[in-house]
Amino acid sequence: MEKNAQPAWEPWQNEYRHGALYLFPPADVAAVVNELRARHDPKSAAICDAHISLSEPLAGPLIGEHLDELRAALAHIAPFDLSYGPLTSIRPYPGVVFAITPEDDFFALRQAVQATSIFAGRDLPRATRVPHMTVAEFITLDETRELVAQLGDTVPGGTFLCDRVTYAVPDASFHFEPVLEIPLGLI
């Protein structure tokens, strides 16, 4: 078993044992999304509050020179507005998500993060994943179609300022807790 692996976790969960980098929406947006997550996918809601995944899972804890390098990279990126909505799915996968735009700004942020030595020499399979904020992921394709049709245009989207990146790490029960926020645009 790998160092720090949790024997009670599934293999995919152990990949996240050192956490990852996320965008967490402000409290008012999170409250709406978290309520939807709790109602339509309690399993996903129990893992993490409303978020937008930014990076691959980290290979080790975020400390020392890697943290300094990440802070320096993020200091050069100005805060920007992110829009969420409408509700959709990312075919061919099951799940209901809020679309996130503008994708160009999001991908520029992701590229800056994953260009640091933290991710050097690693496969980055999530590098081209479409940005999204998940409502339900542990559901079937049929449930996905039904939920998108049911919620349709009744769930409003919105906009919020993306001005920080959050490092979150799972606890022993595999619930991600934010442990550090790194602001954007300090230069």
Image: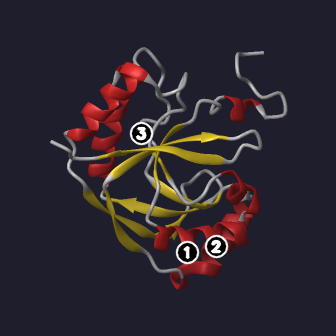
The three-letter code of the residue at mark 1 reads Val
Residue at left 72%, top 72%? 39
Looking at the rendered image, the quarter that the C terminus falls into is top left
Labels 1, 3: front one:
1
| Residue at image coords 41%, 39% | 128
Q: In the image, which disc is placed on residue 35? A: 2
Dot 1, how many residues are within 10 Å of its Cα: few (below 14), some (14-19), or many (20+)? few
* Residue 103 placement, left or right of 48: left
Callout 3: SS = loop
Is residue 46 placed above or below 7 in the rendered structure? below
**Crowd band around label 2 with a 10 angstrom C-alpha radius: few (<14), some (14–19), many (20+):** some
> N-terminal of the two: label 1 or label 3?
1
Q: Position of residue 118 (x, y in %)?
A: 42, 22
Q: Which is more toward the observer, 105 or 167?
A: 167
**Can you tell which mark lies on residue 128?**
3
Q: Is residue 60 above or below residue 99?
A: above
Looking at the rendered structure, which numbered label has been put on residue 40? none
Q: What numbered label is drawn on residue 32?
A: 1
